[in-house]
């Protein structure tokens, strides 16, 4: 269904009433609530089954709105926002004292992002306020990249789902922490470390040692319910043979591996990182739905353009142990 102006107005009204609206962004679908309404924000945590001390990203409609949520804003924030927004970059800044604790999970920092999706931007402009939105999945599940994924994850816990079609990028935004003395990349995304460093004019710290509770940082996250294992191309055929001999039902998410004969439950992934990222979560979901014993994921390249993908695969899988 096309998202008309009337549906956007209805969505903005629901948000004003403290209800939940799921909406598309260029990365993944978000589960939105009015960021200035702590009761509404609490509903997000209940719908996701997410602990309340995990902070949310506030989505805004313009670069200038950073001022409404953050204080002590380093100059580089404006340069980054002007360059990359609307886009898949989340900035962590020191929060204004009046920002509800419910949004920041009790942290004194706030995550801000202006998404690059026409439906999201139109909702943000009509709503005229910040929309707190985590990915619209149950806690620890795979992020949704289509409206049907959101429905599958949250069902009637969400009051309205805006269907903007499949997400263009497919993995969550890069999260850059600018709140302290050292700039840190808390989550890699579509924007590369070198692109960020070129603007920051300094090296980025890429290990998360801040001690902040970020679900994206947990070892097992973004995971299918089926046990998923990461396996190199060299060991792929051998591991698969072993699993078949053990009478295991196996789903395959292949990068280069080609089966010799027709293989069931086989998904061949695109060779380009951008296309791989776009289809990754849908592919994992498709294999997960089959309720197999195991999903075998072939390790893609480990170069810079694959960083975000490898980060998510690392969290969705365990190393193969057969
Ligand atoms: O692409 C995205 O970022 C998507 C779309 C919907 O915008 N959103 C998303 O939200 O991935 P979520 O909640 O699934 O992941 C946001 C991450 C979490 O790991 C959260 O802990 C972290 O951002 N985060 C939020 N506020 C933070 C803060 N003040 N300090 C550190 N990390 C924070
Ligand atoms: Mg998430």
Image: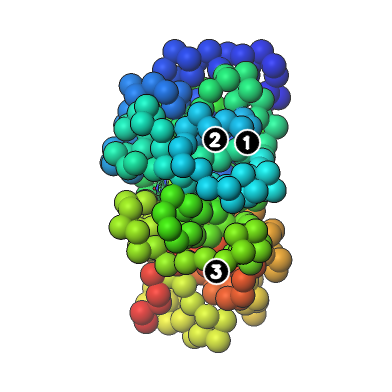
Tell me the element at label 3: loop
Q: Residue at x 66, y 25 (%)?
A: 122
Q: Position of residue 304 (x, y in %)?
A: 62, 71
Identify residue for label 1: 63
Q: Residues within 10 Å of mark 2 (few under 14, many from 20)?
A: many
Identify residue for label 3: 203
Give the camera-side residue of 28 and 243.
Answer: 28
Which quadrant: the N terminus?
Answer: top right
Marks 2 & 1, CB-CB < 8 Å contact: yes
Q: What is the CA distance from the residue labelled 3 to the residue labelled 2?
A: 24 Å
Q: What is the CA distance from the residue labelled 3 to the residue labelled 1?
A: 24 Å
Q: Position of residue 294 (x, y in %)?
A: 42, 66
Q: Residue at x 35, y 59 (%)?
A: 210
Q: What is the CA distance from the residue labelled 2 to the residue labelled 1?
A: 6 Å
Q: Is residue 174 above or below residue 126?
A: below
Q: Is residue 158 above or below residue 253?
A: above
């Amino acid at each position: 269904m096309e998202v008309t102006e009337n549906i956007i107005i209805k969505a903005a009204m629901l948000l004003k009433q403290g209800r939940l609206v799921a909406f598309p962004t260029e990365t993944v679908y978000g589960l939105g609530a009015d960021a200035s309404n702590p009761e509404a924000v609490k509903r997000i945590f209940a719908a996701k089954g997410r602990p309340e001390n995990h902070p949310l990203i506030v989505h805004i409609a313009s670069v200038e709105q950073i001022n409404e949520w953050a204080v002590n804003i380093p100059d580089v924030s404006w340069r980054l926002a002007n360059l990359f927004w609307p886009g898949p970059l989340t900035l962590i800044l020191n929060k204004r004292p009046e920002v509800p604790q419910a949004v920041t999970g009790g942290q004194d920092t706030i995550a801000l992002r202006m998404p690059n999706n026409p439906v999201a931007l139109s909702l943000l402009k009509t709503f005229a306020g910040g929309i707190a939105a985590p990915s619209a999945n149950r806690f620890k599940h795979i992020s949704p990249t289509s409206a049907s994924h959101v429905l599958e994850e949250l069902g009637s816990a969400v009051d309205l789902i805006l269907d903007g079609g499949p997400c263009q990028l497919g993995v969550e935004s890069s999260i850059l922490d600018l709140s302290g003395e050292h700039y840190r990349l808390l989550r890699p995304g579509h924007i590369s470390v070198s692109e960020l460093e070129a603007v920051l004019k300094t090296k980025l710290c890429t290990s998360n040692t801040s001690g902040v509770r970020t679900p994206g940082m947990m070892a097992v996250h973004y995971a299918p319910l089926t046990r998923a294992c990461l396996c190199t191309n060299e060991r792929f055929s051998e591991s698969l043979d072993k699993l078949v001999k053990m009478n295991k039902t196996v789903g395959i998410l292949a990068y280069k591996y080609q089966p010799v004969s027709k293989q069931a439950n086989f998904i061949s992934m695109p060779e380009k990182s951008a296309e791989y990222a776009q289809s990754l979560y849908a592919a994992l979901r498709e294999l997960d739905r089959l309720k197999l014993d195991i999903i075998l994921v072939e390790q893609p390249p480990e170069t810079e353009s694959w960083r975000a993908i490898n980060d998510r695969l690392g969290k969705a899988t365990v190393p193969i142990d057969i």
